[in-house]
Structure formats: C-alpha cells, structure tokens
Amino acid sequence: MSETPRPVISLRDFLSKVCRRLPWWQTKPPIDRPDHNRVDADRARAQVGVIRSAFAQEFGDDSVAVASGDGPARAKDDAEGKFLYHPRRMLVRDGDDFELLARFFADPVRQELFEGELRRVTEPVREKLVVVEVPRRRDQQDSVLATLDDIDREYPDRAERREPLAAPDHIMYVTAIGKFCPETEPEVPRSAQPVPALATDSAAGRGVRVSVVDTGWWADAAKNPATPWVSDVTADPQDLEVLSGSTIREYAGHGTFVAGVIKCLAPGARIEVEGALTHGGAIYESEICAQLDEAIHEDDLPQLISISAGTHTRRNMGLLGFEILAASKGFDDGVRTIVVAAAGNDACDDEFYPAAYPWAIGVGSVDPDQKRSDFSNYGRWVKAYARGRDLVNAFPVGTYTCHYAENVHAGVPDVRTFEGLAVWSGTSFATPTVTGAIAAHMSATANLTDPWKAFDELCAAAPAGPDGSPIIGPL
C-alpha cells in the first residue's frame, strides 16, 4: 500500500510562514539596544558606592559628599554629581588666609548661621596648607559648598582671580564620575605580549627617575615570569598592595599596570610607586598632599611624576592643596619635574585637575586608528594624546568580581581569573605611555635635567591628533 505523498516545502517557504506570524513582519526585527545613558549612570553609582564603602571603613560614615553640577548643593543622585568632597572640611593657605577665614566665621552676625566654631584639624603641608572643619549651618544648606559661595561673595576679588580664600577638600580618584578612568574593568588578555610592546633598547630611560602616584605596587609582579619587565620596580612597604587571599578588590593592580606600561617604553628607568589612592581608588586631596609632601623631597625630585587620577573641581578653580604642594616642591617651575596626569574619561571638555594645570601634561586617549577614544576628555588644556584603548600589562594573580552594570547579568556579576596580565582601557593608561616616552627620549638625547625640553621635542616630531595636539608613543 502506497503512502500519501508528503507536501514538499522549501526552507525559504517555511521561514516565510514563520515570519508572517511575527508582529514585526515586513519591518525590521526589534533590537535590544543598550541604553548608554542608563549604563553610564549605573556605572557612576557603582563607582561612588565603592568609594563610599572604602571611605566609611577608613574614616567613618558621612565621609563622602557628592556635589551637584548646577549649584552649591549636594547631588540628589550620585550619577549626577560633578565631584566628590569631604562634607565638613575645607582647605586654606596657612598664615594670612587662615586668619581671614577665621574672622569670617567669628563675625557676630554670621555666627547665628552656624552651630559651633571653625576648627583647625591638620597641616598636610607644614606651614603652608591647613585643613579646617567647618561648623554645620542652621539653614540646612551644605556646610561646605554654600559657605564657600558666601566666602566668595565676601571676597569677590579673590573669586574673580580664581584664587579663592578656601576650597573643598576634594576627593581625587582613578575614576571619574559618569565615565571611568579606567574606562573598562580589567579583562583577561588573549595574548601574553604587553601592549605597548617592550622596547628593544633595554637602556631606554636609564638615568631617569619616575614616581608613579597611584593605588600601590603588587610586589609579586616583580617575580612573576609573565611580567619580567617590571622586575626592578620598587615601592616602600607602606605603598604595597596586599590581596585578600586570591581576591582582587576594585582598582587593585591599577598602579602595577601603570608602572608596567612605563617600563615597556623605558625599561632602564627607575620606577617608584607611591600607594596614595588606597580607598577604593580614591583619596582626599589633603591626604595625598600630606603623603607626597613626606615622600618626595626637594633635594631628590624625580624628573617625572605620573598621576593617573584627578577630579573636576568647584567652579573649575582647581585643587588648592595640590597647587600649594606643587609650588613647595617645584613641580610648577617648568624646570626639574613634569607632572604627567590623566585627562579623565567624562567625554567632555571641562577641566580635570591636576591634568589641566599649565605646569602639567594632561593626557587624553586615542584608539589605534588615531581618533580620540569616545570616553576621553578633550580641550585646549589636553596637551597630548596616547593610546589608551586595550592596553595589556602587569596585574595581580587572582579572581576579580565585576561591579560595572554591563558586567552584571541577572544580578550575578562576572568573575574573572587573572594570571598576572590584564587588558585595560582609559586615560589612566594613556598617561604612562607619555611618561615612558619622555623618559626614553631623555636618555636617548643625554638630557637628564630638562624633561620639558624632551616633551617639546617629542611633540615636534609627533603626528597631530585630536584638536591638533600631538599623539605620543606607539599605537
């Protein structure tokens, strides 16, 4: 008995019938596109959360405040903040400025506005910089930001000259609110080769001393066969990063990675890591000034100071404490020492300090195609660009639990296992590329005393990048 013939249907006909049953038939299928604004906001909340947690453990609750971008008040949402600061403290120059500030608070009429008195807390830079604790306001306005506005109105000439009588105790961080530096969380590399590649001249950078101001130094990197180029990087015992077992906490390894990038371009340079940004990759401005004042001596200054950290500031007036420190150590004299600093990753042209100072080299990021990275800050204050996308360098051995929103799926964060190398992106890592290039050029030209001259010579020979600024180093 013969079977009834089965209908013949092509795969095309079958798919056509299926498609007709879908609501988007004859239109483009729906695409689940990520909401970049939401992702950036979630990232910012996560980063501020890391800093809040780390500072609470070290300094107690209510030790971090987030400034609104549109007035002298705290941001209602951490994702909308402009900068972080101590909620009760200000910085002021010692001497006449401190006396003026004390008289401001001692005014009998003004005393009715405050609960308590101005209190002198510490001197991060002896006889030059003072940290004061300000009394709370009875009108419920912010004790720091609203009071600084009052001080500006009392001394308008100072505000107009951008030389305020007092300033917030800003929090400097290896990340920036909204977009991050690092732009990405560390990723496991596909190759064991560093990017940028290790220089063929092992003497490049010899005679140049570089201070890396960052999260600290993971000493085991010097013994790891995966990263022989960092074998002679040094740090004082208090500047070492120590893992909790095999757990790599947020932003651990940042300073190790930065030191490794410099070593790839300048293998002969003397690299010393200062572990300043130890609280979730952040630190009070006053605290970093105190640490650097103690660690860096005028009679033994490094030629290069690499800082992959910074912050936006109140009314873009800069970092008062850092200005005082730079003047006391001679960073701002344009002769012996250059500060090379990350431009930040907000994809905006607002000044980011210390990178925006005339006496610093602010470094933005470009991709391998020489175009500005979509996360990099920019503007006339950015003096140079270097590759900051997908660099590969030294990193701790252990496991890292992600916390950026895009790396958390259904409430479960990605967990990554590292063996001593990582892939990372951000202006944090463009910065040591420029630092290493300057060090290598100084030794190659037998110029060990004038880092600015070396930078100018590199710029003259470099290709023009975004806004005409030079692109330094390999891509």
Image: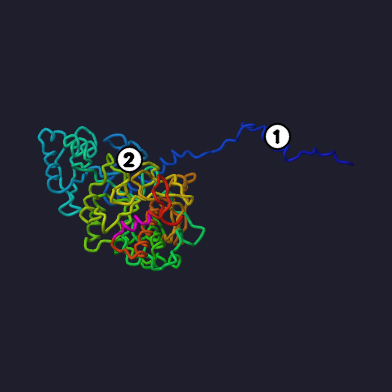
Does residue 45 belong to the magenta stretch? no
Q: Is residue 8 left or right of residue 341?
A: right
Q: Secondary structure at mark 1?
A: helix
Q: Position of residue 344 (x, y in %)?
A: 36, 47
Q: Which mark is residue 82?
A: 2
Residue 22, image quadrant: top right
Magenta region, main secondary structure: helix
Q: Is residue 76 left or right of residue 425?
A: left
From the viewer's perspective, is residue 312 above or below residue 288? above
Does residue 458 belong to the magenta stretch? yes
Name the foreground residue: 434 vs 134: 434
Which residue is at 22% across, 59% downward? 294
Q: Is residue 414 left or right of residue 78?
A: right
Which residue is at 64% across, 31% downward? 26
**Outermost residue, right side:** 1
Disc 2 marks a residue whose amino acid type is Lys
Which residue is at 15% across, 49% downward? 94
Identify residue for label 1.
17
Name the foreground residue: 97 vs 41: 97
Q: Which mark is residue 56?
A: none
Coloration mode:
rainbow
Residue 304, image quadrant: bottom left
Query: Dot 2 surroundings within 10 Å: few (below 14), some, or many (20 or more)?
Result: many
Q: Position of residue 312 (x, y in %)?
A: 31, 44
Segment colored magenta: 450-459
